[in-house]
Image: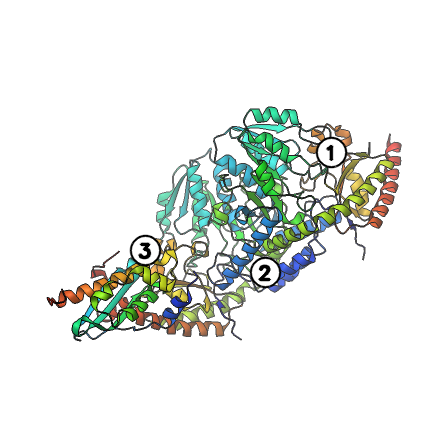
Amino acid sequence: MLKLPIYLDYSATTPLDPRAAAKMIPYLVEKFGNPASRSHSFGWEAEAAVEEAREEVARLVNADPKEIVWTSGATESNNLALKGAAQFYSGKGKHLITLKTEHKAVLDTCRELERQGFEVSYLDVRDDGLLDLEVFKAALRPDTIVVSVMLVNNEIGVIQPISEIGEICRDRGIILHVDAAQATGKVAIDLRALKVDLMSFSAHKTYGPKGIGALYVRRKPRVRLTAQMHGGGHERGFRSGTLPTHQIVGMGEAFRLARLEMGAENERIRMLRDRLLRGLSDIEQVFVNGDMERRVPHNLNISFAYVEGESLLMAIKDLAVSSGSACTSASLEPSYVLRALGREDELAHSSIRFTLGRFTSEEDIDYTIKLLHDKIGRLRELSPLWEMVQDGVDLSTVQWAAH
Amino acid sequence: MFAPVYLDHNATTPIDPVVLEAMLPYLGEQFGNASSRHEYGRAARRAIDQARSQVAMAVGAHASEVVFTSGGSEANNLFIKGAAGCMRPGLLAVSAVEHPCVIKPAEQLSKRGWELAKLPVDGEGCVDAGNFAAVMARKPRIVSVMLANNETGVLQDIETLAERARRSGAWLHTDAVQAVGKVAVDFRRLNAAGVHALTLSAHKIGGPKGAAALILDKRVELEPLIAGGGHERGLRSGTENVAAIVGFGVACELAVQRQAALAQSVLALRRRLEAGLRELGATLFGQGAKRLPNTVCFAFPELDGETLVGHLDRAGYAVASGAACSSANPEPSHVLRAMGVDPELARGAVRVSLGSGNSEDQLAAFLNTLQATVARLQRLTAMAV
Amino acid sequence: MAYSIKVLDHYENPRNVGSFGKEEEGVATGMVGAPACGDVMKLQIKVGKGGVIEDAKFKTYGCGSAIASSSLVTEWVKGKTIDQALEIKNTQIADELALPPVKIHCSILAEDAIKAAVADYKKKHSDPVLA
């Protein structure tokens, strides 16, 4: 049975896996203790659950549990990592490097650091969305203290060359932060092999609950941070505040499931994604955004030329998809990520991000393909631009009566 | 199965079944990201809007004054550091008995050019009026005084303090995490008196951990602690924790409906408990002050609090020594120290905080156990000497 | 974005979509907007004897409100003289479709499309009676 609208927005958030939900419920009922309560069994029981979950998160990324700090989500992790490292190491330098295609949680934090007196270089990416390592090397300065590069882009799903970036940073003693919110369960992460110092995680992008995330803080060589949230000294002073036990338990279980199932799951999702791409490829004038090779298997971002973005979304209301990132979709600005790839505004506006996941079926994909064929056809029939192109007009030569 | 008796409701509370019921759909089918424009997202947005109204209504605020955060600590940090971030450094005053999540951010600011005045309290734990007036005369820019203390339950007369603070031009914040649900809290009235911000938290009132709110007078400008995406009017970015926020909303509604009845029932229990404690020779703290109806903080001379609560736990009673939040802190409570309690006696501090699930029978049995435990420990202490 | 029922109706069932043949008698075209702005409207009118608009067709690249505005305009101009058509104001379009403030520009564009089509007609038919 097809459930409409079909959910193809797994990069905005994922459903909570029922198995993770089932593990959470006892911590919402009888095991309700505060993990910081040191004087009774309610507290110890909660604390034990928190530590078990910490081990599961660490195992997925091959880290030590002591390197995992709980936060309220990846946005907070990114804030803590960047402000915490920049402020702690400000004696060594004032320069940070990041990409123009990072998530707002990184970009807005960098803007704030600029107001605090830091300098930030925002690097361009190639038109396939990937960072050119030569561009990166050229941007490094003697006073560069922190580099922040996402592992997987939220809009186009491309995988940045973190391993190479890590080597370059470690050689120069620069702290490397990686936003891995979109990566867990989709690409293998080995923090013993990668030279990454800080890594942000989110539960709700990996079938865990909202309201919980983590920051990996390397112990060897030791990375230090200035805490951003002060109080009872929870999380070894990195982050104060009562730990939400049930959410932590949910994240632990979600990450455990990801570790066990990601291999088979990603192959299944890749097949569905490729089926979708094939199904849409026979529509004329569609363009894939971002590299298709170095890309997570669940993402497809496509621009449909000569149809307008908002009317396109209206036409496909049976699909729950994103045009641009969920966080910016309240405004009508074209996606800054697609702009950074050099896409003109019209194509950025008419782009759709399809992100598939654990509960996507072949039937969902086939319905999506058929729906898009119908709706793109209809909108192009309505489109004067399409008509002109069919008549052989080169739109770039047209003098538009802009208002 | 052996189920210990929970007497630590100021640390955290069990979730009310009605609250859990309301949350469950958002841990299942209703999983959308509230920022998404499709129906999954819009459904989440509607749920958050409703919870925002419920939270606002519970404390007499307007929905647009509610800023959701991940917890009370974050809300307190947001106010203290956020307000400071929009001003030039000056004088900052917090009471000496505040929770660490107010004191620590204030101490951080004192490293960044702010002058920190810790407002002393009297022997009962109430903010000293004379000193308060003197500090206000020096025109602080930020003031934070809690409504109810987590360790002793002592209530501050925040309205009177606010009237005095008003002339100073300071932004005044009150941490009401322990007060909501136990005493009536009306932000409109407090706001009229001169309180500009108030913190409340879900898990202290039968809601889930992971959701709290800063109620904020819109004249107060704050710099966000967490940037990125512009959620919560730009004051707090990050994907909303829909299920917890929904639970928070319902918990607020219930807390207000039940506040009077709960206060009455736990007060009756507390009075019996206090009478029993006095008979056993315990020292009770803050007895001369107005206090929360559910909280008793006491000590037995020459008995270590940690040891006592350890024995009580094994006997099936969950109580706290000092505050649950200050983990791995061997220091005697800063709250009792501020009240002038001898450090040796303060080391013996035990907190019992009652909730709706507690009964007279439980308290009677607890007193019996306590009596036996204290007697045994006192014998051991005497032998050691 | 919450659309009014009328916008949705025009969006789902746009009236008079299409183009007239290039050689058809009395056809004039108004094309306004720009792809970079997110809206392009093409309005064509077919003017008969006495300057009466006998038929109209449109194509629009734009959001639902832009499509609805142009669809509505094709209905309204039919049967009007070109001078009467020029009296259609954007506020009437916005009112009829209950456009929210952020979509008022769609109605302005539709009014501009009428003006542009009429201007094109007048340019092609400099009939002194009509001028």
**Tag count:** 3
Label at residue B220: none
Which residue in the structure is indicated by mark 3?
A342
Mark nearest the camera among 3 and 2 is: 2
- Disc 1 marks which amino acid? Ala
Looking at the picture, does residue A286 appear above or below residue B173? Answer: below
Q: Could you tell me how far apart the alpha carbons at marks 3 and 2 are, in whole angstroms?
A: 39 Å
Return the x and y of residue C10 as percentages of the image width and height: 36, 69
Question: Mark 2, mark 1: which one is toward the viewer?
Answer: 1
> On what subunit does the disc labeled 1 rest?
B
Comparing labels 1 and 3, the label whose residue is closer to the camera: 1
Secondary structure at badge 3 equals: loop
Q: Which mark is residue B289?
A: 1
Residue at horizontal 49 percent and vertical 53 percent from the top: A180
Amino acid carrying label 3: it is Gly
In the picture shown, does residue B244 fall above or below B385?
Answer: below
Q: Earlier in the sequence, mark 2 or mark 1?
A: 2
Given contact means CB atoms under 8 Å apart, are the residues at marks 2 and 1 in contact?
no
Contact (Cβ within 8 Å) of mark 1 with mark 3 = no
Determine the chain carrying the residue at label 3: A
Q: How far is mark 2 from mark 1, CA to CA?
A: 43 Å
The crowding category of the residue bearing disc 1, from other C-alpha atoms within 10 Å (few below 14, some 14 to 19, many at least 20), is some
Query: Which of the image's four quarters has the C terminus of chain A?
Result: bottom left
